[in-house]
C-alpha cells in the first residue's frame, strides 16, 4: 500500500522494458547481451520468489542425511555412507527441481513443473 | 565456423611469409589477405589467404592460423600439442582440417602457432539441429559421425607423436572420477548432487576397457556441416587417452541435444544410426550400457566445467554476465544426473 514497487516486481518491469522497448532496437552482439540481461533479471526474480523454498529444500537434504553442513553431506556421500539412500535422493531431487526452476524452468519436465508450482502455491497460501 | 571479423593488424605478414616459404619448400609465399576470425577467447584464429610459388603447397591457398591469445601463454593446452593431436587424427582418416605445420617458436608471432587448411561449414549447435538443409540426410550423417569416431579410436597408446599427453589410465572411469572430484574440490563449493553422481559413477563403473585416443568433446556444435555432410571435426583441445565409449556417451548426452531431447544422437537423430556407423567402421558392436554410463558422467563433467566458468566471474577474475550465466547451467545438469541415478539404478553393473 505504499504506491512503490520493490524486489521481484521491479525486476519484472525492468526485464519487460528491456525486452519490449530496448532489445528490438538492438542487433547482433548487443541484442545477445540484452537477452542475457533479461535472462539474469528473470533468474533473480524467481530466486526472490522461491527464497524460503530453497532454504527449506537445502535443510531437507541435510536432515535426510543427518549432516551438519553441505560440506559434511558431500563427505558422507563420497565416503559411501549414503549409497542408494532413497530419502536423500528424494531430498536432493526436490532441491534440484527448485534450483532448475530458478535457473531455467523450461528444463523441467511437465510433471516436475507441476510439482514446483504446487510447492510455490503452498508457500504463498 | 566462426564468421569473419574486421581486418586487423597484428600478424607480421612479411616475416610470416618468409618463414612459411622456408618451411614449405616454396620459392615465394605472397599473402593476399589476413583477417582475424571471431569467436576465440582462448585462441586467435586468423584466415590467411596466400599464393604459394613452388613446393608441395604451390598454388592459391586458404589456411587458418591458430595461435594462443597472449593472456594464456604458458597454458598446457597450447596450439602445438593440439596440432599433434589433429595430425594423428588426420593420419587415422578422421575428417579434420588438413594440418600444414606447427611452430613452437614464439619469437615470430609472440606465441606458438599452428596452420591448417581452411574448411567451410557451420558448426553452431542450435543452428545445425534446427536447419535440416545442413548435413545432408541425417541418418547418413549420424552413420558417418559414428564412423569418424571409430577411425579416431583406432589410435592406440603408445604413440610417439602424442608423448606429451598424460599417460593412458589403467581404469579410465575411475581415473576420471578422481579428476572430477579434484576439480570439484578446487571450486571450494559443496555440490551434494554432483558428489551423489560421482559416487554413483564409482559404484557402477564399468570394468576397464581398451584405451584409445578419444576426443572428449565430440558433440553437436563441434563438427562442421555443409549442405552435403561433415566437413570437419573441430575443437581437439581436450583430447587424450580414454575409454572410446565415453566419446559416444558425450555425443548422446541429453545436455548436447540443443532443444531436441527426443533425438538421442546429439539432437540430430536416432542413436541406432550413430552406433551402426561406429560398428561398421570399427568391426565391434557398441557397448550400449557403457555408453549410457558415460552419458551420466558427461552431465557431471559439463556441470563442473560450467561451475569453473561461473567461478571465473564469481571470483572477480573476469567480470562477465555470460560466465555468470554459464555457471548456472550446472543446476539443470545436476537435475539430469539425479534423474539418472535413482536408488534402483545403483545395482546396475554395465
Image (cartoon, coloured by chain):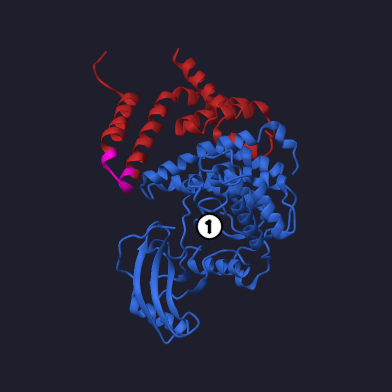
For numbered disc 1, what is the local secondary structure?
A: loop
Query: Does the magenta stretch mainly form a helix, a strand or a loop?
Result: helix
Specify whether B249 is left or right of B317: right
Foreground of the two, B146 or B186: B146
Dot 1 crowding, Cα within 10 Å, few <14, some 14–19, many 20+: few
Q: Residue at x 64, y 40 (%)?
A: A78
Where is residue B20 drawn, in percent x and y? 43, 80
Visual hue assigned to chain A: red
Residue B94 in the image: above or below residue A17: below
**Residue at (34% x, 38% y) in the render:** A37
Residue B64 makes an appearance in the image:
yes
Is residue B239 found left or right of B104 in the rendered image? right
The residues colored magenta run A24-31
Disc 1 designates what residue?
B228
**Residue B315 visible in image:** no
Q: Which one of the lettered chains is coloured blue?
A: B
Residue A71 part of the magenta-drawn span: no
Amino acid at each position: 500500500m505504499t504506491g512503490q514497487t520493490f524486489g521481484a516486481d521491479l525486476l519484472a518491469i525492468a526485464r519487460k522494458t528491456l525486452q519490449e522497448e530496448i532489445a528490438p532496437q538492438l542487433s547482433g552482439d548487443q541484442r545477445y547481451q540484452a537477452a542475457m540481461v533479461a535472462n539474469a533479471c528473470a533468474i533473480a526474480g524467481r530466486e526472490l520468489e522461491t527464497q524460503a523454498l530453497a532454504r527449506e529444500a537445502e535443510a531437507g537434504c541435510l536432515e535426510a542425511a543427518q549432516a551438519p553442513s553441505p560440506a559434511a553431506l558431500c563427505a558422507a556421500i563420497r565416503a559411501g555412507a549414503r549409497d542408494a539412500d532413497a530419502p536423500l535422493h528424494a531430498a536432493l531431487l526436490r532441491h534440484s527441481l527448485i534450483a532448475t526452476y530458478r535457473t531455467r524452468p523450461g528444463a523441467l519436465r511437465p510433471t516436475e513443473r507441476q510439482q514446483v508450482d504446487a510447492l510455490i502455491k503452498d508457500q504463498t497460501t | 565456423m566462426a564468421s569473419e571479423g574486421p581486418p586487423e593488424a597484428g600478424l607480421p605478414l612479411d616475416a610470416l611469409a618468409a618463414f612459411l616459404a622456408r618451411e614449405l619448400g616454396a620459392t615465394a609465399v605472397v599473402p593476399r589477405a589476413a583477417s582475424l576470425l571471431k569467436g576465440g577467447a582462448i585462441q586467435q584464429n586468423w584466415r590467411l589467404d596466400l599464393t604459394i610459388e613452388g613446393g608441395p603447397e604451390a598454388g592459391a591457398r586458404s589456411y587458418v592460423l591458430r595461435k594462443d591469445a597472449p593472456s594464456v601463454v604458458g597454458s598446457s593446452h597450447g596450439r602445438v600439442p593440439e596440432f599433434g593431436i589433429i595430425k594423428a587424427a588426420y593420419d587415422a582418416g578422421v575428417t579434420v582440417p588438413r594440418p600444414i605445420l606447427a611452430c613452437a617458436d614464439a619469437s615470430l608471432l609472440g606465441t606458438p602457432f599452428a596452420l591448417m587448411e581452411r574448411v567451410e561449414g557451420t558448426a553452431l549447435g542450435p543452428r545445425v539441429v534446427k536447419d535440416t538443409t545442413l548435413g545432408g540426410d541425417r541418418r547418413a550423417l549420424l552413420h558417418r559421425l559414428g564412423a569418424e569416431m571409430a577411425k579416431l579410436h583406432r589410435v592406440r597408446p603408445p604413440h610417439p607423436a602424442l608423448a606429451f599427453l598424460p599417460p593412458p589410465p589403467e581404469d579410465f572411469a575411475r581415473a576420471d572420477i578422481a579428476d572430477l572430484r579434484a576439480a570439484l574440490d578446487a571450486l571450494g563449493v559443496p555440490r551434494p548432487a554432483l558428489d551423489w553422481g560421482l559416487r554413483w559413477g564409482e559404484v557402477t563403473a564399468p570394468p576397464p576397457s581398451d584405451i584409445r585416443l578419444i576426443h572428449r568433446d565430440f558433440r553437436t556444435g563441434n563438427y562442421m556441416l555443409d549442405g552435403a555432410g561433415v566437413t570437419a571435426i573441430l575443437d581437439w583441445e581436450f583430447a587424450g587417452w580414454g575409454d572410446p565409449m565415453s566419446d559416444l556417451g558425450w555425443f548422446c548426452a541429453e545436455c548436447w541435444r540443443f532443444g531436441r531431447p527426443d533425438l538421442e544422437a546429439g539432437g540430430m537423430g536416432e542413436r541406432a544410426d550413430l552406433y551402426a556407423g561406429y560398428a561398421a567402421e570399427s568391426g565391434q558392436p557398441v557397448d550400449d550400457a557403457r555408453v549410457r554410463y558415460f552419458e551420466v558422467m558427461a552431465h557431471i563433467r559439463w556441470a563442473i566445467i560450467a561451475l569453473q566458468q561461473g567461478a571465473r566471474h564469481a571470483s572477480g577474475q573476469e567480470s562477465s554476465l555470460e560466465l555468470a550465466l554459464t555457471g548456472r547451467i550446472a543446476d539443470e545438469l545436476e537435475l539430469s544426473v539425479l534423474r539418472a541415478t535413482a536408488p534402483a539404478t545403483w545395482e546396475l553393473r554395465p
